[in-house]
Image: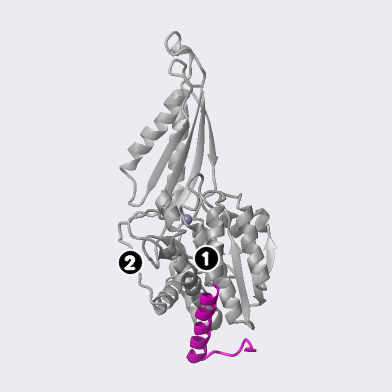
Amino acid sequence: MGLTREDSLSDDQVTEIKERIKREAQRLHPRLIDISHQLHDNPEITFEEHKSAALLTNELEEQGFDVERGVAGLDTAFIATYGSGEPVVGILAEYDALPKIGHACGHNLIATWAVGAGIALRRALPDVQGTIKVFGTPAEEGGGGKVTMAEAGLFDGLAAAIMMHPRDTTYLDRGSLAVTPYEIEFFGKPAHAAAAPEKGVNALDALLQVFFSVNQLRQAFRPHTRIHGVILQGGDAANVIPDYTAGSFLVRANDQAYLEELNRRFVDIVNAAALATGCKVKVTEGISYQQRVCNTGLVDLFRENLTSLGLDYEVPPADAGVGSSDIGNVSQLVPTIHPYLQICEKGIGGHTLEFAEAARSERADELTATGAAVLALTAADVLLRPEAREHLRETFKQQLGREPKG
Ligand SMILES: [Zn+2]
């Protein structure tokens, strides 16, 4: 093609390139099914995705990408790069599984679509002006690979960050809750629960008090606020005053500033419980996932490409519950999308054995090439159309009140 950066492509040229992308994605179809199955058959949890990362990086390398492994100090994170200079478009892969239930969130498909999109783009645009980056982002289910990668500045300067998640419905745009995880430990004093309870300090009382106080606070929550927890250790025997208890909590809100306010309230509740019961307390704050903001300009591009492939979508009900994801942190830096592609009949929820089956079903296999195509087509819009990039920047500024991170 030999395009120079100054060349602006006509609509016909863009259409022709897009047809080429669709053909390349179709040519990759058998290989993509194979990749998806290999990932699914070897589920690896948070930060243990060694085989998965090896499979994906080797594939990208064979297809002409320069691969950097172990980025941001994370063994199983990677960046595969093709081309050089601006604009830079990022396609994000996740490949971690869940303990016991394997690929019950379908991240084998997220990785397959991302890698397939990168390769289809590269084949369709061998002389691309700009850079295609496929990011391998580990530990979405806990550990927040993208948070560490974002802190290392790896997403800075992206014209767009693109990924897609499987589910039981196709959604273009769906928010998420910002979340902060906490581990809480109370230290009391053991005593015979019948003979000498007065000599003990009950660490279980302290932990229960946290639940009671959170439930009291609940009546004053703004909508879409969630605080929920479990008891990890509640004591060892009913006839011993528990001297050590531990709980794990998640504080979630759909607004970053409100989350921080809730975090302060939550820590106050924990300290108050320690004070009320005479326990010592240790609070460990985990890695926060920020709220996801889907760039509406990018959503528009995605919608056009999705429908051009003959796929339909639905609008999520306004009151539908949502979770949290580390793509939120990326979306706070650069124009980002995280749409969903339907891979199974409605009603099969994520993080279930049924969904794990769906992620390796014939229907999911059938969608490996189409999923790669829709991501690649959207990335092509960003790479090939300067006015589209400008629009994404403007949209980002409108939605977040600041410039994308350069
Ligand atoms: Zn997931």
Label 2 CB sits under 8 Å from any ligand 1 atom: no
Q: Secondary structure at mark 2?
A: loop
Find residue 87 and report its horizontal and vertical position in percent.
60, 77
Find residue 399 and report its horizontal and vertical position in percent.
44, 68
The numbered mark, 2 or 1, whose residue comes first in the sequence reads: 1
Q: Is residue 60 left or right of residue 311?
A: right
Residue 138 painted magenta? no
Q: Secondary structure at mark 1?
A: helix
Q: Few, some or many C-alpha atoms within 10 Å of disc 1 (few <14, some 14-19, many ≥20)?
A: many
Residue 60 visible in the shown view: yes
Residue highlighted by disc 2 = 315
- Please state which of the two labelled residues, at mark 2 or mark 1, is closer to the viewer: 1
| Quarter of the figure with the N terminus | bottom right
Residue pictured at 50% horizontal, 83% vertical: 18
Colour convention: one colour
Residue pictured at 38% horizontal, 66% vertical: 170
Residue 9 painted magenta? yes
Whether residue 25 is situated above or below residue 254 in the rendered picture = below
Residue highlighted by disc 1 = 33
> Which is nearer the eye, 272 or 132?
132
Amino acid type of the residue that numbered disc 1 sits on in the rendered structure = Ile
Which range is magenta? 1-28
